Amino acid sequence: MKPVSRKELIRRLKQLGFDGPFAGGKHSFLIRGSKRLILPNQHQGDVGVGLLNRILKQAGVSEEEWNKK
C-alpha cells in the first residue's frame, strides 16, 4: 500500500462499485448498496496509508481487491 490522491481514491472506489461522490454536510460520501462511505475533505497532500486502510476497512474492501485495480 502507498498513499493516493483523493481523486485516485474516488476513481478506484468507483471501479469497485461505489456511486458518487455526493455532497453531504461537511464531507462528501460514496454509496454502494446500503453502505455509505464518508470521504476525507480535499487537502494539499495525499491520503496516507493509515487513513486509506481505515477507509478500505469501512468500505469492506480487502487489500487484495484494492491492489487489483
Image (tube, rainbow, N blue to C red):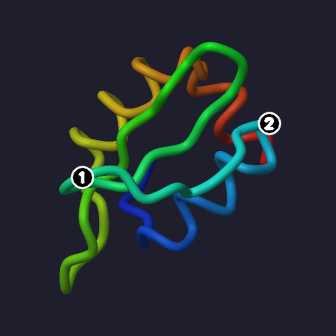
Could you say whether the residue bearing mark 2 is in a helix, strand or loop?
loop
Q: Amino acid at mark 2?
A: Gly
Instruction: Please report the residue visible at 56 percent of the width from the left and 18 percent of the height from the top.
Output: 35
Question: In which image quadrant can residue 18 be found?
Answer: top right
Q: Quadrant of the N terminus?
A: top left
Q: CA distance from mark 2 to mark 1?
A: 23 Å
**Which residue sits furthest bottom?**
44
Residue 23 horizontal/vertical position (percent) = 42, 59
Could you say whether the residue bearing mark 1 is in a helix, strand or loop?
loop
Q: Is residue 61 above or below residue 15?
A: above
Is 29 on the left-hand or right-hand side of 38? right
Q: Nearer the viewer, mark 2 or mark 1?
A: 1
Residue 6 horizontal/vertical position (percent) = 42, 68
Residue 34 horizontal/vertical position (percent) = 62, 13
Q: How many residues crowd mark 1 within 10 Å: few (<14), some (14–19), many (20+)?
A: few
Instruction: Please report the residue visible at 60 percent of the width from the left and 22 percent of the height from the top.
Output: 61
- Taking depth in this image into account, of 23 and 45 the one nearest to the observer is 23
Q: Check residue 17 in the rendering and tell me which mark sits there, or answer none.
A: 2
Q: Amino acid at mark 1?
A: Gly
Q: Is residue 1 above or below residue 43?
A: above
Name the residue tied to disc 1.
25
- Taking depth in this image into account, of 19 and 17 the one nearest to the observer is 19
